[in-house]
Amino acid sequence: MKENSPVSEKQNQNLTSTLSTAASKSLRDLVHSLSQEQIVNQDLLLSLTFALRNFTNLHRFLEFIPCLVTQLIGVRGSLLIPFQDNGSIWREQLQIVPNDEYQELLRQLFLLEDGKKIGFGMKEKNIACLDRLVQRYLNASNLIATSIVSRGRQRGRLYAFDNKEIVFGSNVHRKHIQIVADLTGIAIENDVIFQIIRNHEKVDRQISIGAEIQSQLLPDQCPIIEGVELAACCRPAFQVGGDYYDFMPTRPELNEISKSRGRWAFVIGDVMGKGVPAGLLMTMLRGMLRAEVLTGLSPDSILHDLNQLALEDLTQSHRFVTLFYSDFDAQSRKLRFANAAHNPPLLWRSKSKSITRLDAPGLLIGLQPEAEYGCGEIFLQPGDVLLYYTDGVTEAPGMSGERFDETRLIAFLDKFAKEGLGAKQILNKLFERLDGFVGVSDQHLEDDASMVVLKVNEE
């Protein structure tokens, strides 16, 4: 074999070196190009996550999605079909790039009858039909699709399409489009949650307004009545409650001095149930009862008429009302009363230092037509204490699970009355004991709790 000359060896070395340099440069250029592409893609994804964290307009966010997909994987166009919370196509949020060329597809999707049905996007056969429709109208040689899923629910469908075959250089592209789909699902889910929160805020505002109106319907202070001291308080379990108490002069046209010496109606009631429905019915009954008081009829007649007036409304609402109605003559200290199945008020007699219940026969308001009510009467004496209350007091649960009950209420009333406390002091002490029984860490009552204390002045 003929040996190579020194010149030939040198030329070979130079050629090898040149080829090696060119290969290294090509590799560096390729690495640089991939790095730049990776940086661009990372910037695009960062922009998407930033938009997701800060978006206030879902429509603007969804407009951005098809544009991002085309940039990330280098395709001609992209289509986003989101679903509403009920599974129907969210027609107002359909997005496609390029927009001008595919208006007919958007129109077909908008008019798709099956797509308007609840639960459309939750069935696999419907998703397959949707894919075929998109394929037909795009007229693209290659189409890829992925589902937008959030918390296991179909939130939409994301498509990428091109006239040439879509080639994924690596799994990175597939991961990118899946990331876009996942973040889109989160955005739609967040919007649903935001809408729920907004609706709750609207309801809360309405309830707050209702609570404010109802608080204005309850007496903000007790009237001045000659010879007696009054104190009252209502604690609703919710913002709006079904408890009701009131003080009404039977002759409101008199001046303040004459009214204080005249006859007054004292009433306490409880609409079965809690919250807004009970509060609305209580407000209705208040208006009816105030009109009845002006008639000057006896307590039993007033409850009879009130039952007739409220029967239809209460029957339709499937609720009933307990109500204790009494009228008090400041001059004679005579108290007449009738009871529609309410908790009987407790009367502490100063002379005997004992407690009795004031009760009379009668059915719930709204239970049956032409219900009859009994009428009782007593004369209050100096130092006597009368406690009106609702079952939210006696039914309040303690930390051990037992109820506050009437026995405990009687014991505390007897104790505070014997101490010679005024009406306001007795009321405060009773609520303090109720709070202590329920528990300092959790003073939430299961039901509305109301108490009214009347004490006859000492001679």
Image: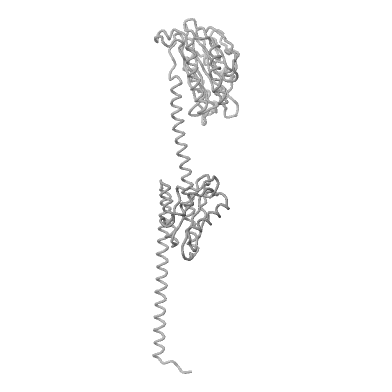
What kind of colouring is applied to the model shown? one colour
Q: Position of residue 319 (x, y in %)?
A: 57, 24
- Say which quarter of the image contains residue 77: bottom left
Q: Nearer the viewer, residue 371 or 230?
A: 371
Q: Nearer the viewer, residue 214 or 20?
A: 214
- Say which quarter of the image contains residue 222: top left
Q: Position of residue 291 (x, y in %)?
A: 47, 15
- Residue 63 lies left or right of residue 115; in this view the side is left
What's the residue at 41%, 55% (across, down)?
A: 99
What's the residue at 49%, 5% (across, down)?
A: 332
393 shown above or below 198: above
Q: How many marks?
A: 0
Q: Position of residue 191 (x, y in %)?
A: 46, 45
Q: Position of residue 277 (x, y in %)?
A: 52, 27
Q: Nearer the viewer, residue 292 or 378?
A: 292
Please, which residue is most extreme toward the top here? 332
329 shown above or below 401: above
364 shown above or below 18: above
423 shown above or below 197: above
